[in-house]
Structure formats: C-alpha cells, structure tokens
Image (tube, rainbow, N blue to C red):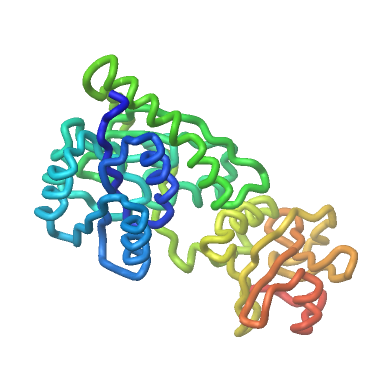
C-alpha cells in the first residue's frame, strides 16, 4: 500500500506543502486544481509543472477533464485540502477509495470554510485535524481519523495552520493503515448538532464591537485575523486602520464607555476601554505605514477621552 496513488485536489497555494509531502513519499499521482482560473492557479500550475508534477485544471461545472485526469493518473484515493469548491459526485467517486477531505476542526463543530479563524477568535485552546469522507454537503461525511493541534495563547491563524501541516503526515499514515488492514476506509458518522459554525469571513466580521467584547475576546479577534485578514478593523470618525496586535492591559477601565481611549503614554502605549477591562493596542497599520499604538495616536492626534466607533 506504500505505492498507493493519491491525487490532491485544491484551489489554493496553501496546499503546496501537502503536495510536497506526497511527492516525497512517492504517493502523489497528480494535482487537480478546481475553481475559477486566476493568477494564483496559474502560478501553482507553472510551479508544479517546473517540478515535474502532473497537474490538471477542472473549471466549475465541468467534470470530464477531471475524471480523465484521475483515470489517466490511475488515482486510487483523492485528498481534498484547502479547496473552497464543491466537488461533483462523478469526480469524487472516480478513485477506487473515493475522496477524503482534511478539515481543521472537530467536526461537526466549526463546519464551514474558515474553521481556524473562528476557533482562534472564540478562544479555543485545541482543534482537531479531521479526515472525513467527501459527501455532497460540505463537511458532513463520516469521520475517518483525527489528530489534535494545540492553539497557543499568542498563535495567529498562520501559526495554527503551520501546526496543522505538521499533523498531516500522521493523519495520512492513519488512513493508509486502514487501507492496509481492512482494504477500505471506515468512518464514524458525525453528530447532527454543533455549537459553533465557521462561515466565510466578511468585512463586517472584522469590525471591532467595543460594546460586546471583553479585552481578551478583542485580542483573540485580532490574532485570528492576523495576518490573513489584516487583524481587526479600527474605526475613528472617517478613518480606518488595521489592528494587528493587542494585549489585555492591567489598567482599570475607569468606567469609561467601551472604545474610549483611557490612557496614552510612551510607557503604557495606547490603552482603550472594552466591555470588560481594558486593552493595549500594540501594532496598527494603515496606508501610511505600520505603527506602535503610541506613535499611531501621536501621528493622528488622538487623545484620552476620544472614542473608537
């Protein structure tokens, strides 16, 4: 079973480390790119061809080219990773052992396209990298294997994603062991209920709601969006900026309205009241550059008593 031929299906360059892993293990049959053709896919296509890796493109709504590639590569298993496209059943059923999706949460919790972001934002300390059978509905197939991934208190989304990548080899070994011992993959059906979802991030999700967030919750929102979404959004009057790093402050909020600047100094930086506690705004970026909180406030003439929206 070490010669098992695996095709990786993706729509993102974020999957390239898994492509390299499968190639090193001599298990990569080819890479199938899905979704609208764009500069990112063009770059992936060129990079893989230069490396001598078989690659094919399947546009939305078309199945013949994908099926032809999978058949020509004699693919026995499909691994879906970092793919935001719906894979038609005709494609999913082509490999002998079907297709397996790798998802960064303990399904059915955080079912959706952005599980890492929402788990960091909600203050989770661990996620489960889950391999599940591909079904017609997103992230609903039977669970085949899981591996825990720690989420540190300062981890950003990219840091957690890199930790996920470290667990992919063990997850693949688990799947291969199932095939070696049983000749097929056996999954456990998912539960029907979940407390959290992981919808696609919208710009409004990045806005800071000072009236609802505690200092810790705000810091989690910021690191969840750093760097992929530019942290969280600061709004003051007509001005907008990206808050890239924040930490809870030991200073009291003095009963100030959430979003109010309560302290500003070179030593303590820019400190703002939240719904519960206060927070130090440490790294802020806009079109003019990247600043620490104090320098940002000084540059834009912010003062204690002013209030972020």
Q: Quadrant of the N terminus?
A: top left
Q: In terms of image quadrants, where is residue 126?
A: top right
**Position of residue 225 measured from the top left corner of the image (x, y, whole percent):** 55, 59
Residue at image point 44% right, 47% down:
17
Taking the view exactly as shown, the residue that stands out farthest to the top is 181
Q: Residue at x 44, y 39 (%)?
A: 105
Q: Nearer the viewer, residue 259 or 42?
A: 42
Quadrant of the drawing holding the C terminus: bottom right
Rendering coords of residue 41 (x, y %): 33, 63
Residue at the spot x=22%, y=22% of the render? 184
Relative to 241, 49 lies left or right: left
Q: Is residue 265 above or below residue 247?
A: below
Taking the view exactly as shown, the residue that stands out farthest to the left is 64
Q: Position of residue 292 (x, y in %)?
A: 76, 69
Q: Which one is nearer the viewer's eye here, 98 or 48?
A: 48
Residue at 67% over, 73% down: 308
Residue situated in front as seen by the camera: 15 or 145: 15
- In the image, residue 74 sits, relative to residue 303, either above or below, namely above
Residue 138: x and y in percent read 28, 45
């Amino acid at each position: 079973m070490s010669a098992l031929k695996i095709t990786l299906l993706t729509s993102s360059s974020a999957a390239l480390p898994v492509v390299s892993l499968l190639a090193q293990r001599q298990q990569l049959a080819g890479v199938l790119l899905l979704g609208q053709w764009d500069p990112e896919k063009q770059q992936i296509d060129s990079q893989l061809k230069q490396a001598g890796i078989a690659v094919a493109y399947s546009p939305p709504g078309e199945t013949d080219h994908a099926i032809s590639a999978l058949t020509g590569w004699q693919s026995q298993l499909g691994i879906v990773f970092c793919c935001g496209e719906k894979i038609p059943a005709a494609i999913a059923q082509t490999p002998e052992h079907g297709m397996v999706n790798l998802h960064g949460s303990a399904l059915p919790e955080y079912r959706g396209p952005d599980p890492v972001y929402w788990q960091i934002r909600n203050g989770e300390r661990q996620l489960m990298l889950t391999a599940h059978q591909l079904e017609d509905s997103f992230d609903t197939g039977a669970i085949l294997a899981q591996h825990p991934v720690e989420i540190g208190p300062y981890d950003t989304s990219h840091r957690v994603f890199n930790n996920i990548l470290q667990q992919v080899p063990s997850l693949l070994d688990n799947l291969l062991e199932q095939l070696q011992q049983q000749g097929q993959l056996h999954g456990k059906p998912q539960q029907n209920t979940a407390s959290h979802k992981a919808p696609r991030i919208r710009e409004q999700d990045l806005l800071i709601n000072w009236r609802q967030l505690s200092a810790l919750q705000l810091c989690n929102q910021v690191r969840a969006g750093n760097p992929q979404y530019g942290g969280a959004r600061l709004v003051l009057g007509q001005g907008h900026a990206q808050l890239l790093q924040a930490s809870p402050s030991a200073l009291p909020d003095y009963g100030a309205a959430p979003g109010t600047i309560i302290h500003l100094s070179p030593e303590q930086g820019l400190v703002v009241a939240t719904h519960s506690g206060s927070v130090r705004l440490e790294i802020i970026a806009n079109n003019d550059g990247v600043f620490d909180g104090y320098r940002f406030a000084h540059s834009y003439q912010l003062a204690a008593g002013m209030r972020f929206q």
